[in-house]
Amino acid sequence: MPDSLADLCLDLARRAKAASSALAVANTTAKNAWLLAAADKLEREADAVLAANATDVAAAPGFGLSAASIDRLSLTPARLTAAADGMRQVAALPDPVGEVREGGTRPNGLQVLKVGVPLGVIFFLYESRPNVTVDAAALCVKSGNAVILRGGKEAAHTNAAVHRLVQADLPNHGLPPDAVQLVPVADREAVGHLLRLSEFIDLTIPRGGESLIRRVAAEAAMPVLKHYQGNCHVYVDDMADLVMAERIIVNAKCQRPGVCNAAETLLVHADVADAFLPRVGRALAERGVELRGCPETLKHIPTAKPATDADYGAEFLDLILAVKVVSTLDAAVAHIARYGSKHTDAIVTRDVSAARRFVAAVDAAAVCVNASTRFNDGFEIGLGAEIGISTDKFHARGPCGLRELTTYKYVITGDGHVRG
């Protein structure tokens, strides 16, 4: 072992850099074979992973984790199968490395191609969700990147078990074992050391609470791909199908409230408030949702609590929903612009022109029309898996899959061409 924590982190980064050079030239067949083998192993040895997860879940209250955080921490057989299926989906996707994205032949006969290449080394920090250990490993290796994984201490046993399984088969397919490394210590100072190693690490991706992400963004010496909050909105237009609208908001809020693409605010056009709010209030109350509404909302849902300005800017990650009645679509857009986090916002309407206006006006990584905000997810939109959702505009936005983990180079081919 290296003599100090700084030396340990430097060693991890150097090994990842060397592994990234080997991965950059690895063939697609080898990468896909590893993905399929690792997926099978996850399912064969699920009992060991679930036992490790049970240890972490049992200790979770001691770390002060909320119910939503414990839900994100918990693995079930179904969630583990979904992670394995994600690896298989990544294997089935086209390899973005070597992909010719644009190009042609210049009038002078010079061929110019824009070709996909890996980013290099990715430092991935994440809290609670051990299933993303699988997603990150799969996406990084397939896209030709080495990854250094840093999970939270609350998931230490699960992450270690998953890492052992997915890393073990790399050499069997001609891939470097250091392509997927796990930071082996819980010391928070390790993060600071790694964030300074821009010579070796090309991109950092933090996935967790806002405090973690802000710390990483402040300290990192390399680019950071991130989102701070998931304050997602559902706007019910005056031309909405109200049965559809009820189904969408119930799903967006209740299907899994502790995730970043769950709805946190419901906006309702004043013309349908009388018909919609009482019925949706009952449906949400039946599912244990606490409503916090504007004065107009309280007229239609007397059991709701008065909303504060802070409620409209909150990411509750819980069965709590802010509600506001708005006079127009433009008022809904203005509310989202003021309080939103540029993550995911939805409109429910049968008016095509209203949908188009909302899509054009709302500045978010994903805008949904007559669909739940929960669909802003890499698996759901066909990326196989995602390493995170970005609300930045450079270099990637929205769910980040294989293509978002690559960049490109220009390949210029001539036949003795020289510039005059």
Image (spheres, rainbow, N blue to C red):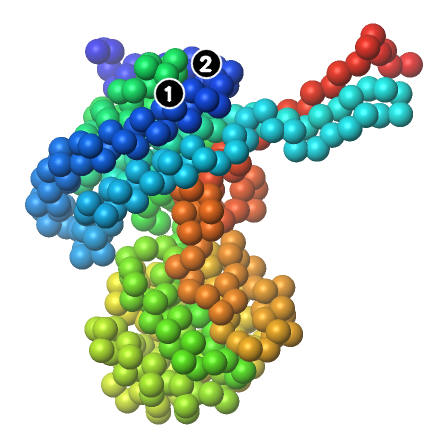
Q: Nearer the viewer, residue 118 or 225?
A: 118
Q: Residues within 10 Å of mark 1 (few under 14, many from 20)?
A: many
Element assignment for label 2? helix
Circle number at residue 58? none
Report the residue marked by disc 1.
Answer: 179
Q: Nearer the viewer, residue 221 or 16?
A: 16
| Residue 93 horizontal/vertical position (percent) | 48, 36
Q: Nearer the viewer, residue 193 or 200?
A: 200
| Residue 253 horizontal/vertical position (percent) | 33, 67
| Residue 62 horizontal/vertical position (percent) | 9, 46
Q: Nearer the viewer, residue 364 or 167?
A: 167
Q: Residue furthest top?
A: 416
Q: Amino acid at mark 2?
A: Ala
Q: Is residue 323 left or right of residue 8?
A: right
Residue at image position (63%, 64%) is 360
CB-based contact (under 8 Å), mark 2 and mark 1: yes
Q: Is residue 94 above or below residue 108?
A: below
Of mark 2 and mark 1, the one earlier in the sequence is: 2
Q: Quadrant of residue 32?
A: top left
Q: Is residue 64 left or right of residue 294?
A: left
Residue 302 can be seen in this image: yes
Kindly report the distance in space between the C-alpha atoms of the residues bearing marks 2 and 1. Answer: 9 Å
Q: Is residue 214 above or below residue 402?
A: below
Circle number at residue 22? 2
Residue at image position (33%, 19%) is 170
